[in-house]
Image (spheres, coloured by chain):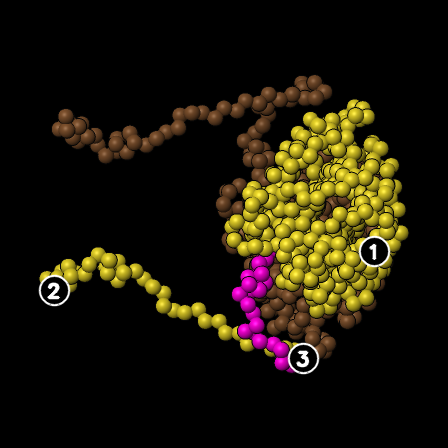
Chain colours: A brown, B yellow
Amino acid sequence: MIEMCQGFLANMNSSSTSSFCHFFEGTEKLLEIWFDKYDDNEADCDLRHIQSSSTSSFCHFFEGTEKLLEIWFDKYDDNEADCDLRHIQRKAWDSLLSFVNCKIISFKRNEHLDAYVLRHWWGRPDLPFAPHTGIRGHSNESSLFVSKNRIIIKTCGSTTLLRCLEPLLYLVKQMAGFDEVVDIFYSRKNFMRPELQDDSHRTFENEVEALDNLFDDGSAYCMGRMNSDCWYLYTLNSPQMESKSFKQTPDQTFEVIMQQLDPKVMNIFTRAVSASAKEATQKSGIDKLMPGMTIDDFLFDPCGYSMNGLIKGGYYVTIHITPEPHCSYVSFETNAPHNSYPDLVNRLLKAFAPGKFLMTICANESSSAYNSQKEFRGVEFAGFDRKELQVCRFKNYDITYGTFAKPNS
Amino acid sequence: MIEMCQGFLANMNSSSTSSFCHFFEGTEKLLEIWFDKYDDNEADCDLRHIQSSSTSSFCHFFEGTEKLLEIWFDKYDDNEADCDLRHIQRKAWDSLLSFVNCKIISFKRNEHLDAYVLRHWWGRPDLPFAPHTGIRGHSNESSLFVSKNRIIIKTCGSTTLLRCLEPLLYLVKQMAGFDEVVDIFYSRKNFMRPELQDDSHRTFENEVEALDNLFDDGSAYCMGRMNSDCWYLYTLNSPQMESKSFKQTPDQTFEVIMQQLDPKVMNIFTRAVSASAKEATQKSGIDKLMPGMTIDDFLFDPCGYSMNGLIKGGYYVTIHITPEPHCSYVSFETNAPHNSYPDLVNRLLKAFAPGKFLMTICANESSSAYNSQKEFRGVEFAGFDRKELQVCRFKNYDITYGTFAKPNS
């Protein structure tokens, strides 16, 4: 019996043994889905209309949600005559932005502000798409604003924004002369797909840990619903700034994040519909949103849009658009003061037609926007339910947070 | 040479080999600490005064931080004439509370409210101390309030409050006749030592997951600093309640959580200083805090204090005290309306002398406390800095959250 077995085994060659031993799960997974149209008007509907390329583009997820970092610098001895963040050379910015996986693609300036448009960059300039997926997808829309004593970096996708923080602080000391961080605001909405982020950004806890390692007495907040739409903020919120002149200078940031946008509007921000950034800017009415803007706009291929607008007095506007219907996302941000933020919101809703939106107003005591939460307390936006309204009173700033959604979104 | 080695090895007996092979880390850990007194008045200071028993009591950590669950019930068909949560029998409560690891130790009632004082119970009534530590420590102070259509359970330590939720809903349907949860408020401050909690409560995310499994459209919030002192809340915040009569009935809950309390005050809540609960209640001035209370107080052995106060009109007061100096914690809660909450806070600060405190006011539109956040916007408490002030406007309630601390606490 033993010999028989030995003979049988001897007749099997190595490959067949391996193939014999290799388990194969024959059990199939079976998925069958039947589609219909609510209004039964399905004459033009046919699943066979889906082309291979459109499937790929349709399926490619892009995280439009931006990470936003704003840092205010000063000098301990207040002798800051020669200090200016705009002394930092272009080469140094290029090098710094490589930590974030971004590169500069456009630049405009005025006497108060340097404004850069950025795009995602994976370290190989010949590769305009994500190497891990091989899909020629969407490019990241990002921005960098540099004034004398404040830096704002806003990046989306899977950029690694916080990785630039330590080298940035070094760079600022070496090239701009500032040696003190007086305040920092790191904020973002919850990611749609956090699992696609780098470890450093996968959870807000990870981000807070990285920031806590660099700053004393940083405060981490979550506004909105932790188990749904919310907005995270890390700030120093320290009494340090109270003694500074910053407090006397009016400062306000207004941000609106829109999702579930009208696909007809979103189509404007694709190369298939608009031949140039300028065309997209005009067709969408972005050029009319705020008066007196010098616009630096960029339309990505095949889709995606970034715009930096400069307004006299050190004010900026920045708009970033992810138009893909399954993950559409538009952000609007400005530090220009406004008499009526609800009015500006209404203009944005008219231009972009979102299904839901989130807004934040951050203002210091000297700002005309400081009492803006009173305006929002009773405000209604036609067709939208208010989901949340929160007001935080910090040491140097008040923040108003609100979310609104169409009834069935 | 080989034989020599073999001989040597043969001479070694098994145990010595094992002992020879067993690695022992000889490297010592060395800790040396020198103590002093700031005012140099150290005549009576001596580390040798520390007795074995006092060390054990001093080192025993107790989590005073309570989990607070408030649920409002109704009947879908509004035919609730025969429904009453007070129909639930004592035996059923006993059984339900075993899920939380609590048992009833005292009971008082008036026409509106049944009020129970609870203590931690590990399943063995002969064992008044934590079986996993063997230390005769502190008993948990907890409370249960039952009115016609609302249940409030507040438990501290490592109680497993959310484990009672599913059986509670069943019990309410069977014995009280209600078949609808119109609103729920689950809240707590961040734990001092979350690692000592049962899995179900170790993180707020775990708690939210358990609640989300039972309720649709629950909202989870974090007020305050996520990386320091904060307060978590889970509530339905749904439009469901808007149609209900509840909204027209004034309702408010005011809670103050105090930490780092004056040890002299805390000593009152030990058996060593006070012979009875009544003595502790009177010495501390708790009996004078609110007018017209019927008091049910309990002084635990060796320390710890619970008080339920009933006030005409369906109002309650509850105070729970963890007096140990390294983890001192006092909570005060009432649903009685107040003309001036800052005034009540000042009375609490005078009675308990905390190093820091957190307060929340939750009020619906009909409540006189609805505009209380305006009162807090400019308020100052002598000797305390305001750390945070937040206001959330929900569907049915407004919540004001504030934290205050002495400059060096």
Q: Chain of mark 3?
A: B
Nearer to us: label 3 or label 1: 1
Dot 2: element:
helix
User: Does B51 lie within the magenta span?
Assistant: yes
Q: Earlier in the sequence, mark 1 or mark 2?
A: 2
Q: Is residue B6 left or right of residue B252?
A: left
Residue beneath the point at 17% across and 28% down: A5
- The quadrant the N terminus of chain B occupies is bottom left
Foreground residue among B296 and A173: B296
The location of residue A390, given as percent across then percent down, is 77, 49
Query: Looking at the picture, do discs 3 and 1 lie on one chain?
Result: yes
Mark 3, Cα crowd under 10 Å, few <14 / some 14-19 / many 20+, is: few
> Label 1, on which residue?
B288
- The quadrant the C terminus of chain B occupies is bottom right
Q: Are marks 3 and 1 in contact (CB under 8 Å)?
A: no
Q: Give the CA distance from mark 2 to mark 3.
A: 71 Å
Residue beneath the point at 60% across and 44% down: B121
Residue A265 picture quarter: top right
Question: What's under tag 2, amino acid-wise?
Answer: Met
Q: Which residues are magenta?
A: B39-62
Residue beneath the point at 70% across and 21% down: A38
Mark 1, Cα crowd under 10 Å, few <14 / some 14-19 / many 20+, is: few
Question: What's under tag 1, amino acid-wise?
Answer: Lys
Can residue A218 be seen at all in this image of the molecule? no
